[in-house]
Amino acid sequence: MFFLYLLLWLIFSMRLSIGIVAAGIAISAAVFMFARVYLNYKIADDYKLIRKGFLVIQYVFILVWETAKGAVAVLLIAYGRTKNVRPCIKYFSIGLKTAPVLAVLANSITLMPGSVVIALEDGQFCIHCLDDSLVEGIEDSAPVRQLRKIERS
């Protein structure tokens, strides 16, 4: 966390000199010590944050890929390549436990072309989708698996 504080100091300073770096080191050390003493911060939390950060970056790439695949599917529907369009409302439960992860999944599903989350109550999703093929296998899709990894870490 010390290096993150120092990096933020250097970015916000917008200049680089020996004095700015020295002041940044002193202020970053003071903020770091304050966090350790008064906020019960542990260095082990840094490792968890770094690991979770990599998992979140992977999730973003997975989400972009899934969104692109969904956009192609909706384009095929919109331009008449798919003849049997079956709009549906589907209820399902994923098994994720924490509210932030459930909210991220709900927003991710809404970002997907052709689908929108209508409700999320007690871990159960209600999704309206343009075609039922757009939500097939969502319970074990790549974004859900990645969110499970994030939740476990």
Image (tube, rainbow, N blue to C red):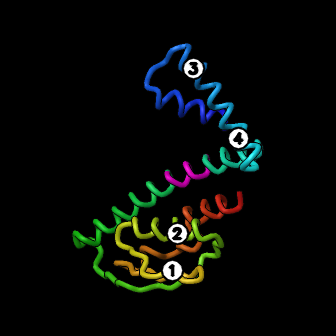
Q: Earlier in the sequence, mark 3 or mark 2?
A: 3
Name the secondary structure under disc 1. Answer: strand
- Local SS, label 4: helix
Are the residues flagged by discs 3 and 4 in contact, CB closer than 8 Å? no
Type of amino acid under label 2: Ala
Which amino acid type is shown beneath numbered disc 4?
Phe
Name the residue that disc number 3 marks. 21
Q: Compared to 90, does 31 lie above or below?
A: above
Residue 60 is situated, as x and y percent measured from the top left of the image, at 50, 53
Q: Earlier in the sequence, mark 4 or mark 2?
A: 4
**How many residues crowd mark 2 within 10 Å: few (<14), some (14–19), many (20+)?**
few
Q: What is the CA distance from the residue labelled 4 to the residue labelled 2?
A: 32 Å
Q: Earlier in the sequence, mark 3 or mark 4?
A: 3
Label 4 – label 1 distance at C-alpha: 39 Å
Sequence order check, earlier mark of 3 and 1 = 3
* Residue highlighted by disc 2: 103
Q: Closer to us: mark 3 or mark 2? A: 3
Q: Secondary structure at mark 3?
A: helix
Measuring 47% from the left and 27% from the top, which residue is drawn there?
A: 13
